[in-house]
Image (cartoon, grey):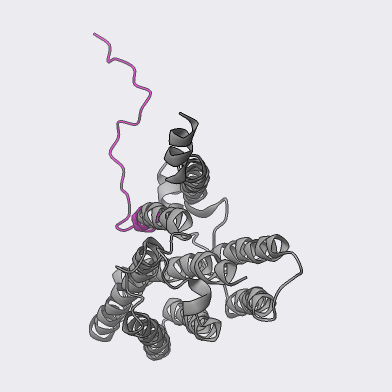
């Protein structure tokens, strides 16, 4: 009796631990991207429905948005420097750059929350009109991502402090870097379609 | 087969300080120009201004993908790029479809349409 011929690999072979993490995390980010696309579509469809309430030109302050954009952009490059330092095995430099990144991230959140509080105090909360519901849903979801990214950043700093720049921590730092840069890409869409285009 | 798996984890492109700085400088320019354009009043035609601003955004997204996310056709043996292209296709269909359908729904089914119908009878 001859063994049936197989065209697939039958010998066991190893996948190094974590070799598929980066791709898996990228696929998660793509699914997150689809979620943001739905929120952008909702804003695009409902953005003009003001219900006789205030519109973008009455509410938005482009100077504030520009400062916020600068915060996120600066945090992107400082995170890049943190990752480069981590790959060179410089733990102290990694932690310092992560701390700087956290500072910019928290500054971004602070400015955004100030803007939200200002809008709600003016009576332009999410319940005012479909435009404002879509605005708070989209920009709020992005802000929530930055908030959770900041929490993740703190936990990674603690892990790097305790365990050093081991392979697992490098992998985690790489995942957070993709998450952080991805949020900056989403913000490009936000400041373009939510703010700039509606202020023309 | 085994050497593909072994090398799979190793050939990530992490960039350099110079590549991050290049990406950052490009991003600053690509952000400052649309902000400046809108803040200074823009072109005479609002449509041209809007298209220009969106154009800057598209270029900046590519810059971020290349310089910060290190997206190449070789990353993860092409699977990252494939996942991204698939996502981009879905996003374009979803966005354009939503805006197209809802625009026509808005213009063809506004409340005053029923008044017009009553007047006609």
Q: Is residue B23 above or below residue A48?
A: below
Total numbered labels placed on residues in the image: 0
- The residue closer to the viewer here, A46 or A20, is A46
Going 50% across and 85% down the picture, which residue do you hit? A64
Quarter-of-image position of residue B34? bottom right
Going 33% across and 69% down the picture, which residue do you hit? A128
Q: Is residue A173 above or below residue A113?
A: above
Going 49% across and 61% down the picture, which residue do you hit? B12
Where residue A19 appears, x then y in whole percent?
A: 36, 55
Where residue A58 appears, x then y in whole percent?
A: 49, 78
Residue furthest out toward the right: B44
Asked whether, in this view, residue B98 is left or right of residue A129, the answer is: right
- The residue closer to the viewer here, B105 or A97, is B105
Report if residue A76 is visible in the image: no
Report if residue A109 is visible in the image: yes
Where residue B42 appears, x then y in whole percent?
A: 71, 73
Where residue B109 appears, x then y in whole percent?
A: 45, 40
Magenta region, main secondary structure: loop
Picture quarter with the N terminus of chain B: top left
Magenta segment range? A1-26
Residue B22: in magenta span: no
Picture quarter with the C terminus of chain B: top left
Asked whether, in this view, residue A46 is left or right of residue B15, the answer is: left
Going 50% across and 47% down the picture, which residue do you hit? B99
- The residue closer to the viewer here, A1 or A143, is A143
């Amino acid at each position: 009796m001859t063994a049936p011929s197989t065209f697939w690999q039958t010998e066991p072979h190893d996948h190094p631990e974590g070799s598929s993490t980066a791709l898996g995390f990228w696929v998660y980010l793509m699914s997150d991207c689809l979620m943001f696309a739905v929120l952008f579509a909702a804003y695009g469809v409902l953005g003009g429905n003001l219900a006789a309430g205030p519109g973008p030109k009455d509410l938005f302050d482009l100077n504030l948005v520009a400062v916020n954009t600068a915060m996120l952009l600066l945090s992107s490059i400082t995170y890049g420097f943190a990752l480069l330092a981590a790959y060179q095995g410089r733990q102290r430099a990694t932690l310092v750059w992560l701390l700087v990144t956290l500072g910019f991230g928290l500054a971004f959140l602070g400015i955004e929350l100030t803007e939200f509080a200002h809008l709600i105090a003016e009576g332009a909360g999410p319940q005012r009109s479909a435009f404002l519901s879509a605005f708070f849903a989209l920009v709020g979801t992005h802000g929530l991502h930055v908030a959770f990214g900041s929490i993740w950043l703190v936990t990674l700093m603690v892990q790097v402090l305790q365990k050093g720049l081991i392979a697992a921590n490098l992998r985690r730092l790489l995942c957070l870097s993709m998450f952080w840069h991805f949020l900056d890409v989403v913000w490009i869409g936000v400041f373009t379609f939510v703010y700039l285009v509606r202020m023309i | 087969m085994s050497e593909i798996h072994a090398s799979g984890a190793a050939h990530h492109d992490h960039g350099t300080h110079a590549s991050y700085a290049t990406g950052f400088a490009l991003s600053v320019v690509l952000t400052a120009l649309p902000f400046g354009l809108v803040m200074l009043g823009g072109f005479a035609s609002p449509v041209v201004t809007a298209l220009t601003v969106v154009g800057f955004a598209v270029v900046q997204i590519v810059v971020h993908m290349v310089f910060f996310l290190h997206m190449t056709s070789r990353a993860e043996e092409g699977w990252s790029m494939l996942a991204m292209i698939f996502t981009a296709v879905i996003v374009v269909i979803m966005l354009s479809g939503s805006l197209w359908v809802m625009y026509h729904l808005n213009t063809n089914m506004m409340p005053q349409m029923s008044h017009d119908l009553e007047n006609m009878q």
